[in-house]
Structure formats: C-alpha cells, structure tokens
Amino acid sequence: DQQVKQNSPSLSVQEGRISILNCDYTNSMFDYFLWYKKYPAEGPTFLISISSIKDKNEDGRFTVFLNKSAKHLSLHIVPSQPGDSAVYFCAASDPGGGADGLTFGKGTHLIIQP
Amino acid sequence: NAGVTQTPKFQVLKTGQSMTLQCAQDMNHEYMSWYRQDPGMGLRLIHYSVGAGITDQGEVPNGYNVSRSTTEDFPLRLLSAAPSQTSVYFCASSRKWGETQYFGPGTRLLVL
C-alpha cells in the first residue's frame, strides 16, 4: 500500500513557464515532507522541505505548498529552466512512527522544453 | 567535507557471489540508511541505523546484511547475490532520524 503517491510519472513544461509537481499521502502521522531532485547516474539531492505546522515554504524559484486536510503537497518551480529537467521525488517522515526513515513516492520525470 | 561517499560505482556479480557495498559519511550523522531504486518503484528502504552498534530492517531487507561499528561507516553486504538484486543502491545519512537525509552518488549493481 503506497503511502506517498506521485500520480504523474512524467510532466513536460515549456522553459520559462511554471512547473507544478503533485504528491498525495495517506498516513496522517506524516509531519515532515521533502522534495528531492535526481539527475541520471547521480544520487538524489535535497531540494526543499516543509513541516506540517506550515502550509508554504519558499526557496528562490522553488515553493512547496502543503494542504494537510487534503493530504496533498505540491512543488512549484517558476520560472522553469532547462537544468530543472530531472526526476523529482516526494518524501515524507513520521518521526513518531519509528526510525525507518523517509517514505518516498515513485517520482515524476520533469522535462523542460526549450 | 566529502558528504556521503559510496564505492564501488558499478559492479557486476554472478549469481551466488557475495560482496560488500561501502558507504561512509564525514558529517558526524547519527542516522544512516540504504535504499534501492528500481524502475517504477521509487526508493525502497533496505536497512537503517540510528547510531553506532544499532541497525534495523527496512521495507526490503531480505538478502542483505548491515553493520555499524563506527559512526562514519555503514556497509551493506549481499550474502548470495541473485538477479533480483540488480538495482541501483543509495546510501543516505541525516543528523538524526526523521530529518533531511543526504544521499551518496549510488552503486549500480548487475547480477547475472
């Protein structure tokens, strides 16, 4: 049973436009959420995170929104750049549920078109 | 500060062989973990450790062993390699469990 779901395996966006990547979760005990970016043949790199006490966190071109009632978070990238083409993983943590780390979604492959 | 390092980058094994994937971090992180990434499956947790001398199983532990004799190192051992273990393996660490994890560059393993 997938606790973190990224329902779009891929997303194509024109350069300069906004990219919106979505993530849904089922475990109401998750209280810390992260986005990772992964290029081919490299390890995932941390991008941005949000705690459940917030509904928005911004870092430059990247903003993460959290809707706890809907158990939904999204990553907005604006404006999108060619270097943003990568696989993006959503991850969640339940610190009270044990030390078994992060639960990851399956990823969304973002393609920025020139 | 090298962060999280992994060796080797690529390895080919025959079914039944054993090997150890190395992972080290120089950030004095308490928490370390191993994931495997398979196409369409995302990242799945194999084993983790909350500190030296303490390890536990994750989602997919079968066929793998770990130990944590020092804070810095967290090797992953394949006891008898199987084709189903063909995957990309990532090691990660964080200051404490539940916090942001930082990943190594990965080891690509092919089991024939």
Image (cartoon, helix red, strand yellow):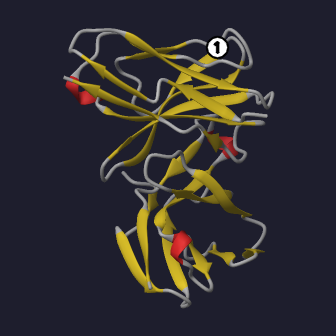
Res. B87 image quadrant:
top left
Where residue B13 sits: x, y (%)? Answer: 28, 17
Local packing at callout 1 (Cα closer than 10 Å; few below 14, some 14-19, many 20+) is: some
Q: Is residue A74 visible?
A: yes
Where residue A8 sits: x, y (%)? Answer: 37, 72
Q: Please give the residue where the numbered disc 1 appears in the rendered image.
A: B68
Identify the subunit bearing mark 1: B
> Does A16 appear above or below A45?
below
Q: Residue at x 56, y 55 (%)?
A: A91
- Tally the numbered discs: 1
Where residue A57 sits: x, y (%)? Answer: 75, 73
> Does A76 appear above or below A33?
below
Left or right position of A102 against B12: right
Q: Residue at x 54, y 91 (%)?
A: A17
Identify the amino acid type marked 1: Arg
Helix, strand or loop at mark 1: loop
Q: Residue at x 59, y 37 (%)?
A: B104
The quadrant of the image that shows the C terminus of chain A is bottom left
Where residue A103 sits: x, y (%)? Answer: 52, 48
Res. B25 image quadrant:
top right
Closer-to-camera residue (B60/B40): B40
